[in-house]
Image (cartoon, coloured by chain):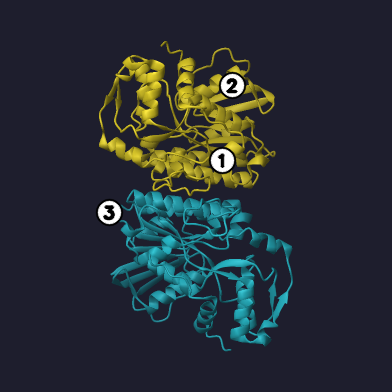
Chain colours: A yellow, B cyan
Amino acid sequence: MTSVLVLGAAGMVGRKLTERLVQQPRLRGADISKLSLVDVIMPQAPADPSFAVEMEAGDFSSPGMAERLISERPDVIFHLAAIVSGEAEADYDKGYTINLDGTRKLFEAIRHAGDHYRPRVVFTSSIAVFGAPFPDTIPDDFHLTPLTSYGTQKAIGEMLLSDLTRRGILDGVGIRLPTIVVRPGKPNKAASSFFSGIIREPLNGEEAVLPVGEDVLHWMASPRAAVGFLIHAAELDGNAIGARRNLTMPGLAVSVAEELETLRRIGGEARLRLIRHEPDETIAGIVAGWPRRFDTARAEGLGFTADASFEAIVRAYIEDEGIAL
Amino acid sequence: MTSVLVLGAAGMVGRKLTERLVQQPRLRGADISKLSLVDVIMPQAPADPSFAVEMEAGDFSSPGMAERLISERPDVIFHLAAIVSGEAEADYDKGYTINLDGTRKLFEAIRHAGDHYRPRVVFTSSIAVFGAPFPDTIPDDFHLTPLTSYGTQKAIGEMLLSDLTRRGILDGVGIRLPTIVVRPGKPNKAASSFFSGIIREPLNGEEAVLPVGEDVLHWMASPRAAVGFLIHAAELDGNAIGARRNLTMPGLAVSVAEELETLRRIGGEARLRLIRHEPDETIAGIVAGWPRRFDTARAEGLGFTADASFEAIVRAYIEDEGIAL
């Protein structure tokens, strides 16, 4: 029997992961016995789980909370909780308190649990650990030079994860997720929001603003692929990974032009006409500083799989979200 | 007038730095007005300083100490204080408390000082931020994959230094020092001790044990070069460095064979015969996991200079320590 704790369960990836665990209630070769869902807002209860589900609203970095969560000895911990990039940049204290101190408290609670407790910890990192200037294709051994506090905090989390794994305190796997496209729901204030918006809004019959040129290239994976990465990271043989516990996940380097062509092919000319080209130099500037393409040989060698194509990403979105064309 | 704080002033590099500041009492284009020397053991008073010197024994990670040191608004902070590699590995809490939490407290004290205080912080990092497997020559953009808690803590310090510099909280330069050879004094328990010992002991007419083969290659700099790196890092124009604030210092990739040949040339055959070959598989194994050679184009482009040759390293040692041949 495998017990599972998800920190950050109310976010988009957390909800998709929960759905997947309910649909396929096995992990690490055993049935899931219990799923604990934690977030700052109360996570939604999944429908018809075959295992016990507990939900809790709370800040895992608050005093005593990590110890209490760990006292139940979950076999697998998905650590998805984070203050996102924009907020961590705007609020120095909040970002460092949650993303760095919170992560450290979690790891320390595991260290002090005793009884040879050594859970698999899947830590979601980000390609924000990398900062420009970049080579055309970023190799697996490229240095971490984050240009945001969020990226810095994720990079530090990676370092702690590796060291505590090496010391036998936990059994960690860090996965650097690409930008998730197509995100369901509404546009948000992230500078990357339009990569999803220019597909999602037209498929809903709504206008979408494109603030950058069509030659812009970006590193993407679907929510379905992201959940696949998380599950695979939970299942993976730790010995196969070796000392370097943090892996850049495979993705697709997709241009805006390819996105638009895919929208036209799947949604038709009428939907393509819902794109409004409104160049925004601020957004274009931010996006220009982002990595565009990775060589993810290590992750692929360990069995992580990218989406087959951008068309497959859009078709998965349509299927998963029940979009009527 | 420039005021200077040295954390870790009682260590070998801290003492050499103090001597140099007394001999050349200018920094960043101004006379040194005051030098504060801090370490867990009381630093020695330098002879005949032309400026005020304060000495203090204390742990900079203890409550309130960083705030108090920062309240005097030193213009330049040399942060050399650290629990060394072996001890940080043996004592998890001590290593993380001093090397990570202590460094964070120092940076937070600077952040909360107010009044647009923004000192130059020279942080001594280490090539221990890198972990095997390595390419033959490690480039400036090679990833940080430390294989010790000490290396992890130094890598995290580098990340914090970069982020706080980017945010305008401090003006940091991190320098990754090579192994310092020839260390004056006695052999110590560091696995790297013999690299100095096989020169230092024979020059003193004493036997030295060589635990590895003569083909072993290692990345070295003299104490004189290390002090030069510190001074240059304090003087350097921050704008010239750019966003990547941490630099691998230039050094020499020296083989044990070259060390022995240099000993013979400078000290004569009799001294070479004081080397006892006693292969030690444990030490050989540790040393095999260390980096051997770096491409330090970035640091060289910024004006950091390595020793001219291993012979120059030995001659500097003889001169600086007043060794009679």
Q: Are marks 2 and 1 in contact (CB under 8 Å)?
A: no
Between A198 and B78, which is closer to the camera in this rendering?
Answer: A198
Q: Amino acid at mark 1?
A: Ala
- The answer for how far apart the CA atoms under marks 2 and 1 are is 27 Å
Tag 1 secondary structure:
helix
Q: Are marks 2 and 3 in contact (CB under 8 Å)?
A: no
At label 1, counting other C-alpha atoms closer than 10 Å, the crowd grade (few under 14, some 14-19, many 20 or more) is: some
Q: Quadrant of the C terminus of chain A?
A: top left
Q: Quadrant of residue A89?
A: top left
Mark 2 chain: A
Q: Amino acid at mark 3?
A: His
Q: Which mark is residue A297?
A: 1
What is the x, y in percent for residue B15? 47, 73
Query: Are callouts 2 and 1 both on one chain?
Result: yes
Q: Quadrant of the N terminus of chain A?
A: top right
Residue A112 visible in the shown view: no
In the rendered image, the residue lying farthest to the bottom is B325
- The answer for how far apart the CA atoms under marks 2 and 3 are is 51 Å
Q: Earlier in the sequence, mark 2 or mark 1?
A: 2
Return the residue at label 2. A21
Mark toward the viewer: 1 or 3: 1
Q: How many marks?
A: 3
Tag 3 secondary structure:
loop
The residue drawn where x is 43% and y is 27% is: A181
Between A71 and A185, which is closer to the camera in this rendering?
Answer: A185
What is the x, y in percent for residue B92? 60, 51
Return the residue at label 3. B116
